[in-house]
């Protein structure tokens, strides 16, 4: 965390002016000298806080090993972590199957101050497994005003880059992932410049930077073309070409195609994901791209009064799997599993990326020769995902 104090208030020089000189007699001088000596002797020694040469060498070796694990992985398997009991159980069970862990636990404010900390227990699990850590840092709440303030304040950006470098060193992170969302489309260039600033600071220390990017389908926004999937406002601030030049990796967050504001449909239909990849690989070298995989689903409940929607973990599907009246389907075009259950006048529809649909998306990693994939998030996935294919 950035421990730098807020700037102090201005102080008039008259506050330091001595209007009535004081003459010190000899005993007073002796007393002051004695007090200064005692204070110097009693002052806590801080030299042990400076890393020794051996400690520095060990830290550099650990960073080199972590970098090698990330950069040499094929495919690179990143997993996101949000602190809850399900996430921790999945992390403990499957840490050895991961390349890098990305906990969502830090945020930057408009002044560039870094807030947050690693959830309790995550560091212990990661270190036992030799698992590199690349935490996420967001504009908290994906607040547009927060992002705008930071992106238009060079001093705040320098403060942010410095804080990210310091915290990464203190906690032995292999790097960071910037997950800024809700950015004003007009701030696209400013965001790319900020990413470049952070990347330069981290690269100086031999650390890595990845960027979470919302899918877009063309260079144009607003996109008035006849394309099936126009670029939306949420993705308009991401300059794929510029970000791809300065960051080590881009994670294409290929999910939330359908939301509570849309009719029922897949979180990430196969055709939608392919269209997003088609644009991404035209802008970014595939070796720098990770495909974001949704480990969750969504349910819509429709009644005569309207419709509501909520996200689903795999455990939430038991209500469909256990009911004989529930209809389970596979959509050949969208390559996603969906369920439907009618209860009186209530129609419940759920789309979920189970292991079958996730395997289809993982094949796209091979087809497009991407660096790897990133699963959002641990604890909500189909348990069969961890089984070797074919079992």
Image (tube, rainbow, N blue to C red):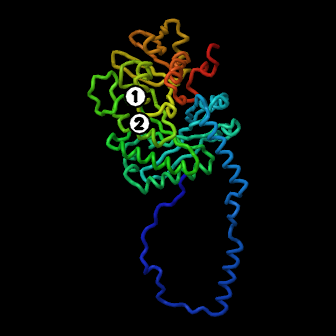
Residue 15: mark in rendering? none
Outermost residue on the top side: it is 324
Q: Which residue is mark 1?
A: 279
| 111 over 277 or under it: above or below | below
Q: Position of residue 217 (x, y in %)?
A: 36, 28
Quarter of the rendering containing residue 277 = top left
Q: Position of residue 234 (x, y in %)?
A: 37, 34
Residue occupying the point 55% across, 43% down: 208
Disc 1 on helix, strand or loop? helix
Spatial CA distance of label 2 from label 1 is 9 Å
User: Is the residue under label 1 in contact with that under label 2 (CB below 8 Å)?
Assistant: yes
Image quadrant holding the C terminus, namely top right
Label 2 Cα neighbours within 10 Å, binned few <14 / some 14-19 / many ≥20: many
Answer whether residue 374 is visible to the viewer in this image: no
| 12 over 127 or under it: above or below | below
Q: Position of residue 83 (x, y in %)?
A: 57, 36
| 349 over 170 or under it: above or below | above
Q: Position of residue 302 (x, y in %)?
A: 38, 16
| 11 over 376 or under it: above or below | below
Residue occupying the point 67% across, 28% down: 93
Outermost residue on the left side: it is 224
Disc 2 on helix, strand or loop? helix
Q: Is residue 295 left or right of residue 277?
A: right
Q: Earlier in the sequence, mark 2 or mark 1?
A: 2
Asked whether 103 or 225 is in front, the reply is: 225
Label 1 Cα neighbours within 10 Å, binned few <14 / some 14-19 / many ≥20: some
Asked whether 306 or 24 is in front, the reply is: 24
Asked whether 193 or 268 is in front, the reply is: 193
Q: Which residue is mark 2?
A: 240
Residue occupying the point 63% across, 28% down: 90
């Amino acid at each position: 965390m950035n421990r730098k104090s807020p700037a102090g208030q201005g102080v008039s020089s008259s506050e330091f002016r001595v209007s009535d000189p004081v003459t010190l007699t000899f005993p007073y001088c002796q007393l002051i000298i004695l007090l200064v000596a005692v204070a110097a002797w009693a002052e806590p020694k801080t030299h042990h806080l400076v890393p020794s040469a051996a400690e520095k060498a060990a830290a550099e070796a650990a960073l080199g090993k972590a970098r090698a694990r990330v950069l040499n992985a094929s495919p690179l398997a990143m997993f996101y972590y949000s602190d809850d009991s399900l996430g921790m159980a999945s992390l403990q069970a499957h840490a050895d199957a991961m390349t890098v862990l990305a906990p969502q636990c830090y945020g930057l404010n408009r002044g560039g101050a870094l807030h947050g900390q690693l959830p309790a227990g995550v560091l212990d699990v990661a270190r036992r497994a030799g698992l590199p850590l690349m935490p996420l840092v967001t504009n908290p709440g994906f607040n547009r005003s927060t992002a705008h303030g930071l992106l238009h304040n060079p001093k705040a950006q320098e403060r942010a880059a410095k804080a990210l470098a310091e915290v990464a060193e203190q906690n032995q992170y292999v790097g960071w992932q910037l997950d800024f969302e809700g950015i004003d489309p007009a701030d696209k260039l400013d965001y790319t410049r900020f990413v470049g600033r952070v990347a330069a600071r981290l690269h100086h220390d031999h650390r890595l930077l990845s960027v979470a990017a919302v899918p877009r389908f063309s260079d144009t926004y607003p996109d008035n073309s006849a394309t099936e999937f126009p670029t939306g406002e949420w993705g308009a601030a991401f300059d794929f070409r510029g970000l791809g030049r300065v960051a080590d990796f881009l994670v294409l967050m290929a999910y939330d195609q359908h939301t509570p504001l849309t009719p029922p449909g897949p979180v990430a239909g196969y055709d939608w994901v392919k269209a997003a990849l088609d644009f991404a690989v035209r802008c970014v070298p595939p070796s720098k791209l990770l495909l974001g995989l949704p480990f969750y689903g969504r349910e819509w409940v429709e009644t005569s009064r309207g419709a509501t929607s909520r996200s689903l973990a795999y455990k939430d599907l038991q209500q469909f799997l256990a009911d004989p009246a529930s209809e389970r389907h596979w959509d050949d075009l969208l390559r996603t599993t969906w369920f439907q259950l009618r209860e009186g006048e209530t129609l419940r529809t759920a789309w979920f990326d189970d292991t079958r649909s996730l395997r289809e998306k993982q094949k796209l990693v091979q087809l497009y020769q991407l660096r790897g994939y990133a699963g959002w998030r641990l604890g909500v996935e189909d348990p069969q995902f961890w089984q070797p294919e074919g079992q």
